[in-house]
Image (cartoon, helix red, strand yellow):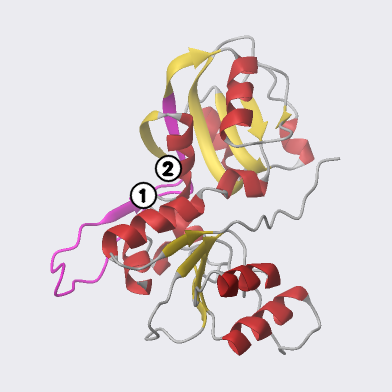
Amino acid sequence: MVNALERFAPLPLQEGFDNAGLQLGLTEAEVSGALLCLDVTESMVDEALQRGCNLIVSHHPLIFRPLKQISDKNDVQRTVWKAIREGICVVSMHTNMDNAPGGVNYKIAAKMGLTDVRLLGEARTFCPSPSVADPHPAVVSYASGVVGELEEALPAADFLGMIKREFRVECIQANQLLSRPVRRVAICGGAGSFLLGDAIAAGADAFVTGEMHYHDYFGHEQQIQICVIGHYQSEQFTNEVFREIIERECPGVRCCLAETNTNPILYV
């Protein structure tokens, strides 16, 4: 199953700072069930145990920075210790799944109903190694974002309302509302401020992402509608991508979408 995920989103597609792939556990273990989630926490390990899953597939890596010890010092170390103790394997598909064709950004675009979805940002290529199953693999083109078109243009206020409904967002951070309709939409799940310039260059009317810096909002009034919906909210449907891959490539493996909300940010 790990191979199926990595065929869809090869590890070389991840950014240099990342740590996607197997986090802990035995790759040859028989899978009793896969819990699909955004973050791996102690409560997520508890949910895996409650639902009879010995595999957690997450978007955000459990082990992102090197560990010098495994103790009860912090939440990551406690989670690693608990997962090992309970025999839970953890696999994370992070920026490789962000960048992969059909991955996180394409799922966000699908939730908005965008058409003609194409790459946004620096386009890169990767050629998978030949295998018995695929002796002549196609070159993969990928980038950190996507851009597409709404089927019908929407007034800016209606566009923001649609985003709030579709992504169950309590609060949107936006700049001055556009006086023109929104038709072309650029997307980067997670922290996407680095793609704002690419969105503008692509002629996007709106840029939807999870996080942006305060100063990035300045100077774009009536140029582009900035729409920041929260890191968790922007990537919450990644588990649906995992389910689609596993059910297609590994029929018979039981998949469970996580019910535990790991968003650490409250709106009060």
Residue linked to disc 2: 106
Residue located at (35% from left, 62% from top)? 246
In screen coordinates, is 36 left or right of 46? left
Callout 2, which amino acid? Tyr
User: Which comes sooner in the sequence, label 2 or label 1?
Assistant: 1
Q: Which residues are magenta?
A: 120-149
Residue linked to disc 1: 101
The image quadrant of residue 180 is: top right
Quick check: 67 above or below 185?
below
In screen coordinates, is 221 left or right of 21? right
Callout 1, which amino acid? Pro
225 vs 150, nearest the viewer? 150
- Residues under labels 2 and 1: Cα distance? 7 Å
Residue 72 drawn at (x, y percent): 79, 85
Q: Secondary structure at mark 2?
A: helix
Residue located at (71% from left, 32% from top)? 172
Reply yes or no: does residue 156 show up in magenta.
no
Q: Is residue 125 visible?
A: no
The image quadrant of residue 255 is: bottom left
Question: Disc 2, disc 1: CB below 8 Å?
Answer: yes
Residue 105 drawn at (x, y percent): 47, 44
Q: Secondary structure at mark 1?
A: loop
Residue 15 drawn at (x, y percent): 51, 62
